Amino acid sequence: MYGFLWPNGAGKTTTMKSIMGLITPESWDITVLWYDGLTIEARKKVGFMPENTYLYKYLTGREFLRFNGKFFDISADDLELRIDELLKKIWLSDAGDIYLKNYSKGMLQRVWLAQSIINKPELLFLDEPMSGLDPIGRRMVKDLLLSLQQEGTTIFFNTHILADVESICDEISIINRGSIIVESQPVKKLKMPLEDFFIQEISKHDTATDSCIRGA
């Protein structure tokens, strides 16, 4: 479970879009699951939940999951079983046949999370997965992520809710002004609360950067 942390304007969205092949970086190479970028073979093993949910409002939750599941090599019978299982996991079994236009923001967030794991990915990218969720919804998502981790899924997610990161992440990296300033820091080895560590590292980097700019 890998947390990717950032202040506003740090480059988080650009990083995620580059990884997912939505934009092409001007330099550097990206490897996903040992593939050169997000190839077709890599896509079969990857799940992605973007920060902003753009869903077809006149599909039901069940129809939306079925639509996404058909992009993968899943038999019709297995897909229906998987949809039922996912709706149960995200606590939407009773809402599976309701149009998405009638879902609350939190319900949309949860069904979007379900589509990201419908192919049982080896690697899961989540962009603000708990944004807009109430405490009960956040607990459900955290429990789901921990169960996925126990099943062998590697999870990479962006968030600014440091309490969630502190409670479930194994390692973190911090990005600021387009640079990785902390890389693969084990959360359990921190000698201070994560919030204090985050602010400390951002402040150190900003001070060093500002000094370089003034010196130039």
Image: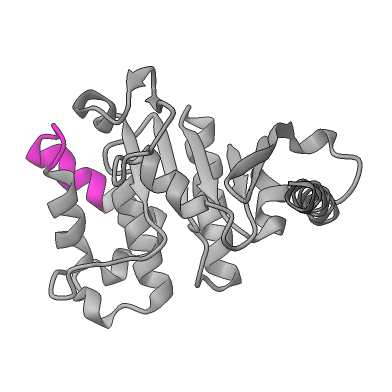
Q: Position of residue 97 (x, y in %)?
A: 18, 70
Q: Residue 117 location in percent, x, y?
A: 34, 43
Q: Is residue 75 inside the magenta stretch? A: yes
Q: Quick check: 172 left or right of 74?
A: right
Residue 11 location (% of width, % of height): 53, 51
Q: Residue at x 32, y 21 (%)?
A: 36
Pick out the residue farthest to the left: 76
Image color mode: one colour
- So how many labels did they put on this image? 0
Residue 62 is left or right of residue 17, and the answer is left
Residue found at the far top of this picture: 34
Residue placed at 14% from the left, 34% from the top? 74
The verdict on residue 175 being magenta is no
For the stretch drawn in magenta, what is the main secondary structure? Answer: helix
Indicate the position of residue 158 as horizontal and vertical percent values.
Answer: 54, 51
Image quadrant assignment for residue 65: bottom left
* x 21%, y 75%: residue: 98
Above/below status of 115 relative to 125: below
The foreground one among 13 and 94 is 13
Using the image, determine if residue 161 lies above or below residue 76.
below
Q: Residue at x 81, y 50 (%)?
A: 211
Foreground: 32 or 63?
A: 32
For residue 117, above or below residue 102:
above
Image quarter for residue 73? top left
Question: Which residue of the protein is positioned furthest toward the right in this rendering?
Answer: 191
Q: Is residue 27 left or right of residue 207?
A: left
In the rendered image, the vertical position of residue 86 relative to residue 137, given as above or below = above
In the rendered image, which quarter contains the N terminus? top right
The part of the chain drawn in magenta is: 71-83
Residue at the bottom extreme, as displayed: 102
